[in-house]
Image: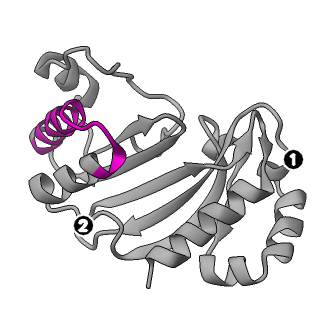
Amino acid sequence: MNGNWESAAIFKPGSFTTEREVREYIGDRREVACEAFFKDAFLGVRRQGDPEYLISFVLGFAKALESSCSGSELSETLTKRFNIPVGVHFRFAEIGAVDAWKSVGPLNIPDPHVALVGFDQLLRELAQSSVGQERHHAKAIEFAYDNQDGTTHWIALPISDGMTINQSKLKTALEVFCDQSF
């Protein structure tokens, strides 16, 4: 919340998320982000609003996650239940260190199509970046979307083997994005 991306309340699958827990976590905040992990891939949503709205959203997100067996099922539920058009209104992509996105610093990719065409240049920029040199966290590429209503969301795919970026996984993630964005 409020840009504090590396400190979160964690609700484990199968455990019940109570309204009291969510209320305590939200307090008087006006922004919340929820992420759901499916193996090493994840989907996140950030919403803004008054605390009651955010409490309702977090509880609804938890219920949607509880009833979803995959990221695509969760995407469908979020679209239907919360009018979040998952995968629409692309803004940018970033390569980051999982659980240390802000502190390590991501590498921004304004246009994945250009990055794929100039993949060798992307690899050179990545090698010189803080995230490309960092060796303590797994890496992912996030595709960020702006839903134009104060809601943002992101879809992240793993691109590392252990803590080191796997060039083939990165290229495949860019190819999948580019194939689906036409």
| Disc 2 residue crowd, few under 14, some 14–19, many 20+, Cα 10 Å | some
Rounded to the nearest whole Å, what is the CA distance between mark 1 and mark 2? 34 Å
Position of 180 relative to 15 (above/below)? below
Location of mark 1 (residue)? 133
The quadrant of the rendering that contains the N terminus is top left
* Mark 1 surroundings: few (<14), some (14-19) or many (≥20) residues within 10 A: few
The answer to the question of whether label 1 and label 2 lie on touching residues, with beta carbons closer than 8 A, is: no
Of 126 and 160, nearer the camera is 160
Judged by depth in the image, the label closer to the viewer, 1 or 2, is 2
Q: Position of residue 157 (x, y in %)?
A: 55, 51
- Main SS, magenta region, reads helix
Secondary structure type for disc 1? helix
Name the amino acid type tagged 1.
Answer: Gln
> Which comes sooner in the sequence, label 1 or label 2?
2
Q: What stretch is highlighted in magenta?
A: 53-72
Q: Residue 20 carries which label?
A: none
Residue type at the position of mark 2: Pro
Classify residue 106 by image quadrant: bottom right
